Image: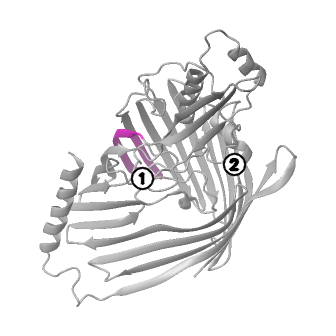
Amino acid sequence: MNRCNIIILLYFASSIFINAQDISPLSPDSKKETSIYGFVRSGFYCGIDDSKDKLNLPSAYSDFALKLETGDGTRFKGFTDLRFRYGTEFNKSVNRLDLREAYITVNGNTWDISAGQKIIKWGRADFTNPTQKLSPQNLISRSTDHEDMDMGNLLMDARWYPSPVISIEAVAIPYFRSSVLLIDPLDLPSYIKINQIESLVTDKNMFTYGLKADLHVKGIDLSLSWFDGYDPMPGIALTNFSIDTIGYIPFPSAALSAKPYKIKNIGFDFETILGSFGLRGEAAWTIPYLSCKTNDYVPCREIKWVAGVDWMKGNWRITGEYSGKAIPDFEPSAVEPLIGTEIDPSMLATLLSIPGFDLEEYIRQQVSTFNRLYNYQLEKSYHSAGLRVETDLFHGNLTPSVTTLYNFTSRDLMVMPELIWKPADAFTITAGGEFFSGRKGSVYDIVDEFMNCFKLGLKVNF
């Protein structure tokens, strides 16, 4: 099904559904309800400068959020979430206005249609969601609210409920919005530059769509999903390379760029209850349109699976999850990854002294290996686990928790302790930290210098 057919289908479906109602959803007799709310928040992130062995404050900010919700309670609804941030992030000044969400929803008896900037999340797992491809994420988000990592997309979302146990959803995304990569603040050598995708890509060929069917039967919820379009997580491509041979030692220069790639993603997920335990799982098969063997920025085909359980007793809540992946077309990488690590100049000089050594091809191989490192495809299979333990104290006014993620294959470890205190109804204080570690050259080893932190957040709702 091509892009034009899907748009036409959604347009005629919305027209038929709206015209089929006895009362227009925009009837002047509808009772309008409007509410305005939001918050003011300050955040401080403290890290350790390894070069000076001192504490520093790379991120500090003030946030203002204004949310507006309007509608008649039945037929239509409008929602806007506007954010303004002022401060610093990773030692860079920040002064930005962000329209996080702004969309309109029209409801019928057995359908609803939304259009605008919206966050849509598929999947039921807690830590890893292989079926979630619709909304990008800011993986370096500096916020005490973990939901702020999610980013909206301009889209149209149509849902049909033919029976109480079945729902069908179709999502159309005409443009591409990139996720913010975990490596964005990475301090690269002077001869390497990574160009990120900073804004919406409005190329006419960047269309994406997704289809999902939900089945709600007694004791279990099931979903089947299909995604066809551009993965919100772009790859890194070598776009320019040159060597300055004027000096005594050749000096290379390489420009890398974030580049979108198109995929198909077939997904399945479920959720059920077994006694006092909640069980959930997901599985997805991701198939890029282009081959990873001839396109360095494209990951290889992969199969992912997730199984999770949660348990609650009294004030305690424990969530555990196992996830794995396999790369069917796996081939060992041609070189050891060096991007993001300290490069030994003598090693580079030795390589350049080899007769016939092609430095440009070597850099290209490094870019390909870095993409495989970032996408966890350096090995044929990966296995990881996550655990969250939290409890409520003092009638829910104090909530301590610890979240741990560990990849058994790459040995990447993330630990996130957090303490949420609510001294008053509208006032919240959040304290905690984010600590990353990994073996030399792993993803978390590369990012730990700028991601490791202690954090404090103050928030007042209105």
Residue type at numbered disc 2: Met
Furthest residue in direction front, as rendered: 246
Residue type at numbered disc 1: Val
Q: Is residue 415 visible?
A: yes
Where residue 277 sits in the image (x, y, percent)?
Answer: 47, 50
In depth, the one of 191 and 331 nearer the eye is 191
Q: Residue at x 50, y 23 (%)?
A: 380
Q: Residue at x 26, y 78 (%)?
A: 75
Give the residue number, with chain letter if any, for mark 1. Answer: 201
Q: Is residue 191 above or below residue 381?
A: below
Furthest residue in direction top, as rendered: 355
Asked if residue 359 is among those painted magenta in the image, a careful observer would answer: no
Where residue 382 sits in the image (x, y, percent)?
Answer: 53, 30
Asked if residue 267 is among those painted magenta in the image, a careful observer would answer: yes
* Drawn side of residue 209 relative to residue 151, left or right: left
Q: Is residue 394 visible?
A: no
Mark 1 neighbour density, 10 Å: few (under 14) some (14–19) many (20 or more): some
| Magenta part of the chain | 261-283
In depth, the one of 312 and 212 nearer the eye is 212
Q: Earlier in the sequence, mark 2 or mark 1?
A: 1
Give the residue number, with chain letter if any, for mark 2. Answer: 451
Element at label 2: helix
In depth, the one of 45 and 359 nearer the eye is 359
Foreground: disc 2 or disc 1: 1
Where residue 14 sits in the image (x, y, percent)?
Answer: 19, 66
Q: Is residue 433 above or below residue 245?
A: below
Real-space Cα distance between discs 2 and 1? 28 Å
Instruction: Tell me if label 2 and label 1 are in contact, CB under 8 Å.
Output: no
Q: Is residue 202 above or below residue 12?
A: above
